[in-house]
Amino acid sequence: MRAWLPFFLSLFLLQGCAGALVVGAVSGAMVANDERPVSTQLDDTNANFNIASALSSQVDLKNQANISAVVMNNNVLLIGQAPSSMLRNKAISVVKGLGLGGKIHNQIRIGNPTSFTTRSNDSWITTKVKGRMLSEQNLDMTNIKVITENGEVFLIGYVAKEQADLAVEVARNTSGVRKVIKVFEYVDT
């Protein structure tokens, strides 16, 4: 039951039957097109919630840092900013303590948390990158997550190498992108 919690929370937050149908249709399409087994998809979703909860329970991290995680195929991408290496290391230690089993990719930068303006710009860059990827005929971005943090675009996913290379090329040639960081796991083709 715990694995389905995020789905049921989504349904609760959306009011009306139309919202439930949209969530169901989109979730079904995403699950069907994802290369990962459904159990892994659910594990990744749960891991995202567990990491967010564990990090926010640490008062110093919550008040002084801006750290988030993305989980794909049990691998964790940690991004954001921490004002000191001590807090960065604490965040990594908290995530390791959850025993998720995959690799932890530390991309936490030492520095002050980004401003609201920077985060808004990052959202816009992510939207532009995703839009360009959607319009790229030879790219199936079903298994690619795009996250932007302070102008750096992180691409995480479970894809064929050719798809990863194409995704990087699209992201690299999008205005506003300072750097592209790949965190791909490759599917055997």
Image: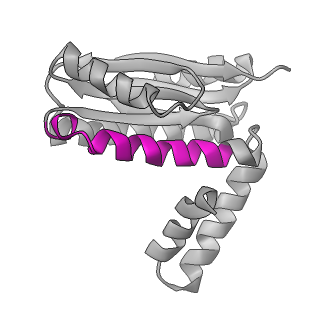
Question: In which quadrant is the C terminus drawn?
Answer: top right
Q: Is residue 90 left or right of residue 16?
A: left
Numbered label tally: 0
**Camera-nearest residue between 60 and 29:** 60
- Residue at the image position 59 percent from the left and 76 percent from the top: 20
Above or below for 64 versus 23: above
**Camera-nearest residue between 149 and 132:** 149
- Residue at the image position 35 percent from the left and 36 percent from the top: 68
Residue at the outermost right position: 189
The stretch drawn in magenta includes residue 150: no
Q: Position of residue 132 (x, y in %)?
A: 53, 36
Tell me where residue 29 sits by quadrant: bottom right
**Principal SS element in the magenta part?**
helix
Q: Is residue 160 left or right of residue 61?
A: right
What span is in magenta?
A: 41-63
- Residue at the image position 30 percent from the left and 28 percent from the top: 80
Question: In which quadrant is the N terminus drawn?
Answer: bottom right
Q: Position of residue 139 (x, y in %)?
A: 69, 32
Q: Position of residue 92 (x, y in %)?
A: 37, 23
- Residue at the image position 17 percent from the left and 42 percent from the top: 116
Residue 174 visible in this rendered orientation of the protein: no
Q: Is residue 152 left or right of residue 184?
A: left
Q: Is residue 41 left or right of residue 170?
A: right
Residue 4 visible in this rendered orientation of the protein: yes
**Camera-nearest residue between 94 and 188:** 94
The stretch drawn in magenta includes residue 60: yes
